[in-house]
Image (spheres, rainbow, N blue to C red):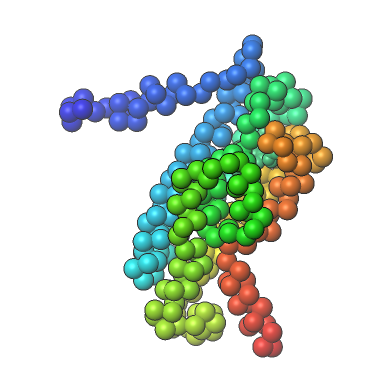
Amino acid sequence: MSHDEISYPTYLELGTLLSLQKPQSKPEHPDELLFIVVHQASELWFKVLLHEFDTLIARLGEGDAQGSLTSMQRINTLVELVSTELSALDTLPPQRFMQFRGYLGRSSGSQSAQFRAIEATSGLRDPHFMAALKEHGELPPIVARAIERPTLQTLFLQLLERQGVALEAVYTEPQHGLLHMLAESLLAYEQGFARWRFLHVQLVERIIGPDTGGTGGTLGAKYLAKTVNQRFFPELWAVRARLYGRG
Ligand code: HEM
């Protein structure tokens, strides 16, 4: 396309984008469009997040603490945004969701490859997580790629090692201001992600109740509540305990 032909609708491919919301209910339920758009918008933000993680990982690998902090600031803003948009579905009352839930079939957020790739990139590698991934058959390439890379915690600790700074020193020696901000931005990410999980559990409880199973076959809110305490950066939590342990 030549420069002159590019306009707002062509640049953004609005024709295609706005044709992708296809409610399944018949007759169309008035709330299904909102349900689809919140999910699609979340997936778009997941795409941007994964893209930003590529930049972050490259910067951490280059030992670029300032650049990594800049990446983390954007990532944390995006996680907050994707959490906030869940609240749009707080306006979906249970009796109305019930009217079109049957049209979703077996589709469930637990099949989101991008979400799993974000978790894997961030650092989830525990046996429970890996087993859950395999339940859905072949690993999606985007998840397989994420698992092959070192976790964010490993990359951060390697960056410290190359600079000859111990993790405890980041918290106790004032000259490591930039590294301290970077460590805390990683922790803020962990908190922000857990906040998404918590808001999602609350949303699920509000709409389908605490004891209803999910369309993906899990125990629903009970399963999701267990995921809230997963940790991407155990070392960043442990270092705090060590500081206090010393008295
Ligand atoms: C009406 C609103 C929603 C309900 C009732 C709901 C329900 C559920 C349930 C019950 C699960 C557990 C898996 C299962 O058995 O299906 C789940 C998982 C999930 N949902 Fe939702 N959800 C809602 C909105 C959203 C939105 C807007 C997103 C954004 C992408 C989302 C993303 C996910 C993800 C990523 C998982 C997997 C979480 C994990 O395994 O840790 N959900 N959802």
Residue 109 falls in image quadrant = top right
Question: Which quadrant of the figure contains the C terminus?
Answer: bottom right
Q: Quadrant for ligand 1?
A: top right
Residue ranking furthest to the right: 211
Q: Residue at x 64, y 44 (%)?
A: 135
Number of numbered discs on residues: 0
Estimate the x, y position of residue 121 in percent, counting from the top left.
50, 56
Q: Position of residue 172 (x, y in %)?
A: 54, 84
| Picture layout, residue 74 above or below residue 108 | below
In the picture, which quadrant includes the N terminus?
A: top left
Q: Position of residue 24 (x, y in %)?
A: 60, 19
- Say if 113 sits above or below 232 in the image: above
Q: Nearer the viewer, residue 93 or 19?
A: 19
Look at the picture and state if 149 lies above or below 32.
below
For image coordinates 52% across by 58% down, the residue present is 122
Asked if residue 195 lies left or right of residue 205, the reply is: left
| Residue sitting nearer the eye, 244 or 230 | 230
Residue at image point 46% right, 70% down:
156
- State left or right for residue 5 relative to residue 97: left
Does the image show residue 127? yes
Instruction: Give the residue displayed 67% in from the left and 82% down from the top.
Output: 244
**Residue 86 visible in the picture:** no
Residue at far front of view: 138
**Position of 118 compared to 159: left or right?**
right
